[in-house]
Image (spheres, coloured by chain):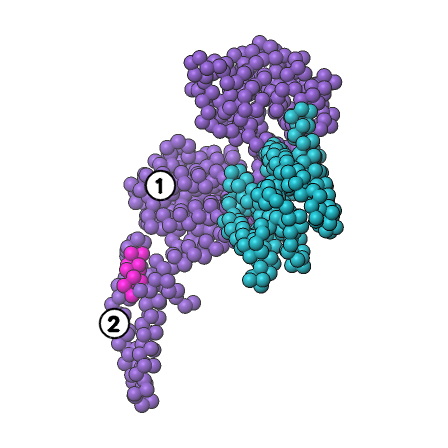
Chain colours: A purple, B cyan
Amino acid sequence: MNITAIGISHHTAPVGVREAFALPGDLPLRLLRAFKAEDAFEEALVLDTCNRTEVYFVANKCDDPMGYLLGHIARLKSIPAVTDTSAFYHHQGADAVQHMFRVAGALDSQIVGEHQILGQLKGAYRLALEARTTGLLLNKLLHWAFRVGKRAQSETNLGRGSTSIAQAAVELAQQVFASLAGKSVMLVGAGETGALAAKALVRVGAGNVVVANRSLDRARKVAESLRTLQPEDAVALDLEDPSIRCPALLAMLEMLPKDIDRRPAAGEKERFAARAIELPDIPQAIGDVDLVICATGAPDMVLTGKEITKALRRAGRSVLIVDIAVPRDVDPKLDKLSNVFLYNIDDLDRIVSKNIATRELEVPRVEAIIADEFGTFAAWCDSLEVIPTIKILQEYFAEIQQAEIKRYGGKFSDADREQLEQFTRSLCNKILHQPIAFLRSLSDSASLSQRQAAADFIRSAFRLKGRKDKP
Amino acid sequence: MDILFKVAEWLLPLLYMGLVIDYGVTFFLRIRTHVHNGWIPVIILFHAAFLVVRSIHLGQPPLFNGYEILSVIALSTTAVYYIVELVGHDRRTGLFVFLIVFLAQYTSSVFLANTAIEPTTPAVAGQGWRSLHSLAATFAYTALALAGVYGALHLIGRRNLKRHNIGLLFDRLPPLELLGRTCWYAIIGGLVFMTISVVTGALVYGRGAGGPDAEAMSAKIIAKIVVGSVTWLVCVVAVLGKGVGKWSDSRVCLVAAGGFLTVAILFVASLALS
């Protein structure tokens, strides 16, 4: 396994160090093209995510790959050359393969079991294909890694459950509602986040949106923007955008269907209503909604008092209230109403903690998958090596020799049989001499792919595929 | 042939137990939650074939004995659940449904093995009406069983959510709304079928009243009438409550679950008495 992995990740360096080596935009492709042009690596792949930057390669004629790599990255990013490499890991052979399998299986991720890494690995592979820096070994390794990732997701509960407050809110909503499409939603607070969220709500099919805010003007502005909403205005929401301070709500919206065009056709009555109210009007409106999101910056509770209680009790239907404001916006007493499910930021945090604990329990099962896949990959790699091929070839001829002696040995005396054995052994060695010498010469001079091709040919010619050399 | 029947009678509970285990694994380990179970149609076919062959052999449909009816309920519940699973692409509730199915089939098998097969209703005119009456009642019990299971799951899920109990059941059950809706549809189905059963039953037993066997059969008929009436009443109360009284899903589910439990107890009691 002539594979090497060099990289830096959240395990070895803080973000302040990692960001210096991050490769945004087209830098990974440029790096791969540089490798190709300089013929330093026979095969190469660059994986760059928010938590890691790492390069997998099959070395060709590079004595100091770490220095070579860091030098290239420094030149690409116009940063000073790196002398301290303590933050970087350097895995070779089996370690490198197992590392990639752990990455693909999301065991090496900051949030163990997260789903994005497999897509990021596929993206990295696409880039390597585009740069034509993959060959037999990396192609196989990547496909093996994808299989590890898929098995980890499908055969274990590693990726199940939310691990962020935002996803926890989604999970919570999914316990109550079959779907949020067509549901009435009240946003309490109409800041920038509220406006974005309301647009997204309409885009994904909310039947009725009520925007409640201390400033009616602000709430109206949001409601008006909904009424005149065009599909192209429905921005794609980036949950990682730090300007969005209400990720729980936005994540909820992400669970809804994305292909609904909410723009009414000519003459068609609007299929949804968006209206603005002031905070004191909430009791009149709250009885008609299914989901309430509270995210104001108010110092006191917003949803409290007898009127709110009466309105919610009258509603009859289940109402989910997610209070993600700190200090809280919602009076905890409302949770005593039989039809109200009130969850605050601490509850969401408990959901996250439980899911993380569940994921930890799944790690051994994923480790077992990795061990299983590594075993088959290692066997495949062995089949491509020259020395094991020579050993298998010799064993094969020895088996033939023994079989023939057994078959005809009875016709000879004991003394003659010894001669016969010497003769057949010598004959086999002479026949094998040239092919073995040829294979040995390759291990000194030829490239990996040439060696693999030769080994593959020999194994095919003598039908040795599937055989393993004896330890 | 009798040996084949005996084998099938004991094989069916085992098959349903297999489903309970399979769905238990799905529920507790949360794996294959959205993958259809290919064994269900096979078991349905086997069960249906058993009932058809048995009916041909005995010369009567499997609806004249409480234990036979239990077996038909097990079959129809399985069939309805399979449709629910196909439509909803969700098998998280299968464990609970097949627990009921297994209990029904196990009871049926145990008692069928020790019960002489003979009609429990008087031989009266109008065989077609009788079949329709029994079949409709069987479907109504099936619907009530499903309503009871989904209603109970709704109540359990709701209780967990209300208590902020982020435990075993938190993300293992389907959404409350879905459970409530399924319970509601089952209740409506139960009302329709039980109404048909009551009307056809009145026709059948009205004609049969005063016949030579009427007196002997009266206790069993009364038991059937009580069980059927309670089933119909449960469905009516739930439908009126939701339709007129604007009941919440939870209250409908409570009536369904409580009603199912009551009917199940009455059903078993009537079997024991008979």
Q: Where is residue A56? Give x, y as percent.
A: 40, 45
Q: Main secondary structure of the magenta part?
A: helix
Q: Residue at x 29, y 41 (%)?
A: A37
Q: Residues within 10 Å of mark 1 (few under 14, many from 20)?
A: many
Q: Indicate the position of residue A83 as horizontal and vertical percent values.
A: 44, 40
Q: Which residues are magenta?
A: A451-462
Q: Please tell me whether residue A457 belongs to the stretch shown in magenta.
A: yes
Front residue (pair A215, B62)? B62
Name the quadrant of the N terminus of chain A. bottom left
| Above-or-below relation of A3 to A87 | below
Three-letter amino acid code at the position of disc 1: Ala
Location of residue A251 (image quadrant): top right
Residue B4 image point, x, y percent: 56, 61
Dot 2: what SS? helix
Any magenta on residue B19?
no
Counting residues from the start of the chain, the first of labels 1 and 2 encountered is 1
